[in-house]
Image (cartoon, grey):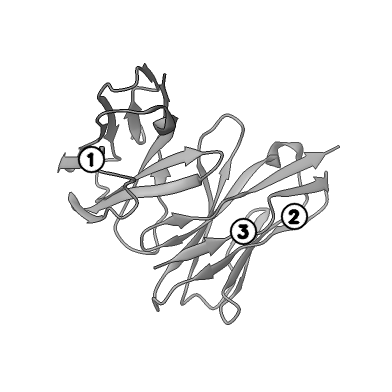
Amino acid sequence: DAGVIQSPRHEVTEMGQEVTLRCKPISGHNSLFWYRQTMMRGLELLIYFNNNVPIDDSGMPEDRFSAKMPNASFSTLKIQPSEPRDSAVYFCASSFQGVNTEAFFGQGTRLTVV
Amino acid sequence: AQKITQTQPGMFVQEKEAVTLDCTYDTSDQSYGLFWYKQPSSGEMIFLIYQGSYDEQNATEGRYSLNFQKARKSANLVISASQLGDSAMYFCAIRTALIFGKGTTLSVSS
């Protein structure tokens, strides 16, 4: 398996623009996580899905952020409109459901909002 | 809600020495998993070791071991015989939701 695939790897956008980050989980995994990593806040869980259903989105910072998982092999994280403070590395991770399985991370998307 | 606390922002160790990275957790769940990940300067997240809440023995994976003290709610990572390549950020995490601590930066010198 190719692992968790995120695209794009780097994104530079202007403030106010819509940004869409994409994630393809490992085939067969039924849990998917989105994280944001910054120096100030560390690695924050934004939202996670089990079997394509959002379970906990309490980490989503505000209404400008939305995440979807239309099927088991694809998820998106959208920011609209983007702001400079959204600049961060965004990670997607996937795993089998359950407390005893490790999650595998994608390479991350480095987002810069200017 | 689940929470992870890592109180050591940075740790320094010499090659071949052992080092312990601290992690305490808080959860009201009876069943949970504890994980350690490594993030080198290249940025990828690498899974190191797992401990289940019902596991009676401490987990070990090569040079990594997890010192699990359930009553104290601690899950410290022990790296034996440190190597230069161990220099990285180390994160402790708890699952169900896979919440991470702030991390500890480990620097290994020769």
Amino acid type for the residue under numbered disc 1? Ser
Q: Which residue is mark 2?
A: B80
Q: Which residue is mark 1?
A: A66
Residue A48 visible within the image: yes
Identify which residue, B37 or B101, lies in the foreground: B101
Label 3: chain letter? B
Q: How far apart are the alpha carbons under marks 2 and 3?
A: 19 Å
Point out the tag, 2 or 3, that comes first from the N-terminus: 3
Please tell me which residue is depicted at 66% across the width and 62% down the height of the picture: B22
Report whether B69 appears left or right of B13.
left
Up/down of B94 relative to B88, above or below: below
**Discs 2 and 1 share one subunit:** no
Q: Which label lies toward us, 3 or 1?
A: 1
Please tell me which residue is depicted at 27% across the width and 34% down the height of the picture: A24
Query: Extreme bottom residue here?
Result: B71
The circle on residue A86 is: none
Please tell me which residue is depicted at 75% across the width and 49% down the height of the picture: B11
The circle on residue B6 is: 3
Identify which residue, B64 or A94, lies in the foreground: A94
- Residue B110 pos. (x, y %): 86, 37
Label 1: chain letter? A
Quarter of the picture holding the N terminus of chain A: top left
